[in-house]
Amino acid sequence: MNWLNELYKMNKQEPDKEIERSLVNAIFRIYDRFPRIGLRERIGQQEMSLDIADAYIHGHNAMIEAGVGIGKSFAYLIPSLLTNQMSQKPVIIATSSIQLSEQIHKDLRIIGSRLGFSTVRSVVGKGMGQYACRSRAAEWISLDDATSSVSTLAQRILDYEIDERADIKAGVSDAEWSHVSVNDCKFERCHHKSACLFYDMRAKLNAKAHEIDFIIVNQDLLIRDLMKKKEGTKSIISEQPALIVIDEAHNLEAKVRDARTLEFTYRGICRTLDTTVQLLTKQSGDKSLFSQSKFMKNCAERIFKQVNADLLHHAKQDNDRIKVSEIKGIPLNQVSNELKDLSLRLSILTSRHEREIDDAFEAINGLITLIHVLAEIEDNYLRWASSPLGVATISICPKDISQFLKYALFNGKVPVILTSATLCQGGDTLEEQYSYMTHSLGYKGDFLERQPSPFDYTNHAMMYISNKVPYYQHDQREIYLEAAYKELVQLCNLTQGRTIVLFSAKEDMKYIHKKLISKANEYTWAVHVQKEGSSQDSVIADFRKSKGVLLGTGVFWEGVNIEGSDLSQVIIFRLPFPVPSDPVYEYKASVTENPFMEVFVPDMLLRLRQGTGRLIRSETDLGILSILDSRLSTAAKKSYREQVLDTLPFKKVTEDFEVVERFVQNKRIRRTD
C-alpha cells in the first residue's frame, strides 16, 4: 500500500495541516474500500475514526460515546493503525477485561490484514497470575506426590502443553493454579525465560518505541503502570506511546479505586510482621523484635474484634462495605511508632534478598497508613470493612482518585481517547451529557459528538415498566420479592424463557432462584443461575442451549453478548442505585450540592444503560426490556423518570401488560425450536 508509505513520509516533511489532510484522506480511502474487502461501514463509525484522528493530530484528549452496534473497535483501530504507521510509536489500548483484550487483538488482526498492514507487531498484556511458571512447576514436582492433581498439572506445564491458564479447556480451581502460576518472577535469572510467555509478554510491553506497534492491556495493568511512573519506579509499559485508547471507560473510576485500595486482614498483618521480623533478626539478632511484634499482633487482634462486631451488626451480605466505627482502647499512636521503627530498620537493611526487603518495606508502610487512618491522623482516605469469603477485611483508599488521573493520565503528554457505549447522561450540551464522567475521572479534554446505536429500537423493542410491584423496603423485603416473583414468572412465560434477569443484590437473586426451583413444575423453561468465580462461559452456553431463564448479577450487567432469538427479554429486577451507606458513595455525595441527582441517579443510569444494552445486539434482534421497579412508573412521579426515558434508546414504553403481549404476538417472538 504505497499511500501508507507516502503518509509516513508526509509526517516527516509536512506541517500539521498537511498531516491532518493526509490522515483524513487515508481514513476516507480505507472506508471506501470496505465493500471490496467484505466489511460493512456502519453509521457513525467513520465519524468516530475521523474524530480520533483529529485528536491525535492536535494532541488532545477526547471522550466519545459509541452506541451498541456501531463497531467501535474498528472505529478506533483504523486511526490507531495509521497513527502507528505515521509516528513509528506504539498505540496502547486498555480494556476492562482479559476477554475484551483478546477480542480487540483478534479485531486488530482482522482489520490489519484486510487493509494491508501486514507487519503489525502486537502483544496482549495480562497479569502474572494468568501465566504458568515452569520454575515453580519443577519445584512442586520435586516436593509433592507425583500422583496429585497439582503434580499432573505441573508436569503438563513442564511438557509445554500449558503456557497460560486459558490453555486448560476443562478449567482449574484457583487453589490448584496458585501453586504453579507466576507469582514472583526471577526475570533474567530464570533459566526457563526463553520459553516463557510471561517473560516474553513483559519484554514486549516495555519494548522500545520502534520495536512494537500495539500494546493491548486491561485497565488494571495500565493503572499499575501509571502508579509506577508517578512514583518514579520502573514502568511496566512502553514510555513512548503515540496514543492511548481506553475502551469501556465507564469502568475506569472503579478500576483506579480498586488499584489504589489497600486491604488488610488479621492473618495478613501477622504474616507481614513475621516476615519483617525474620528479615531483621537474621542480620541483627535483636530478640526484642519478637515482643515488639507480639504487641502489634495483639493490637491488630483487638482492632479486628471491633470490626467483626461492626460487620455482624450492619452487613447484610459478604460484599457489603460498611463503616468502621471509632477504634477505642487501643494505643494506635504506640503501634504507629513501633511500625515506623520497623520501616526505618528495613530501609537501611542490606541483603541479597532485595526483593523481599522491598516487599516487606512496602507492606509495613501500608500498615502505617492504615493505623494513621484508623487513628484519624490521616484524613485523605476512605475506610470501610467487608467480609469477602467470610474473612473480615479493612480497606482504605484515597478519597479523590480524580486528582491521580488528572495528573497521571490526562496531562497532555500523550493523547488519550476514552470510549464506551455508556458515558453520557441527559443534558442540552455535550459538557452536560459527559459531566458525571468528567468529574469522576478528573478528565481534561474534548467532548465529541455521541454516535448513537444504528439498531432499530423503535420497531424491534419495547420497554415495559411494572406498576404492580410495591416499592422495595428492606424491612418488608419479602412482600416486594413475592410480588416481583409473580410478575417475573408471567413475563418469562410470555417469551417462553429466553430471558436474562439482572439483579442488583445477590440476596434477591438467591431468594428468587430458590423460589423458582421449588416451583419448577409450574413452568416449562429451565432455570440457570450465575456461578461463583469470574468466568460465566459455561452457564451462558447452558442458557443458550436450553433457551431458558438466566439469573445474574455483577458481571452479567455488561460484556454479555447474545445475538438472535436465544435472548428475547431482559428483566431489570430493581433499578441499580448504589447503596447510600457505601463509604465511597457517601464521600462522593458529601462533596456535591444535590447528591441524589448529581451522584446516585447518574451512577444508576450508567449501570442501567449497561444492563439494558444486553437486549438488542444485532440489526435483526427483537425483544422486551422489563423493569420490575414501580418507582419508574407514571404514578410514582419520581423526578428521574424522564431522565431515564430520555437516556435509554427505547421509544415504545408501556405499563400495560396486554400491550406487551400484543407486541410479542405481532413480532412473533416465539421459540424457533
Image (spheres, rainbow, N blue to C red):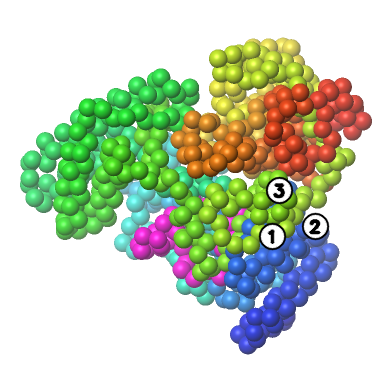
Q: Is residue 334 left or right of residue 598?
A: left
| Tag 2 residue | 42
Residue type, label 3 = Gly
Residue at x 51% of width, y 45% of height: 254
For residue 256, say whether it is visible: yes
In this view, the residue farthest toward the bottom is 13
* Quarter of the figure with the N terminus: bottom right
Q: Is residue 228 magenta?
A: yes
- x, y percent for residue 633: 75, 26
For residue 145, say whether it is visible: no
Local crowd size for mark 2, using a 10 Å CA cut-off: few (<14), some (14–19), many (≥20): some
Question: What is the magenta range?
Answer: 219-247
In this view, the residue farthest toward the right is 666
Residue at x 8% of width, y 40% of height: 288
| Tag 1 residue | 448
Marks 3/1: CA–CA distance: 14 Å
- x, y percent for residue 203: 44, 64
| Tag 3 residue | 427
Q: Nearer the viewer, residue 598 or 174?
A: 598
Local crowd size for mark 3, using a 10 Å CA cut-off: few (<14), some (14–19), many (≥20): some
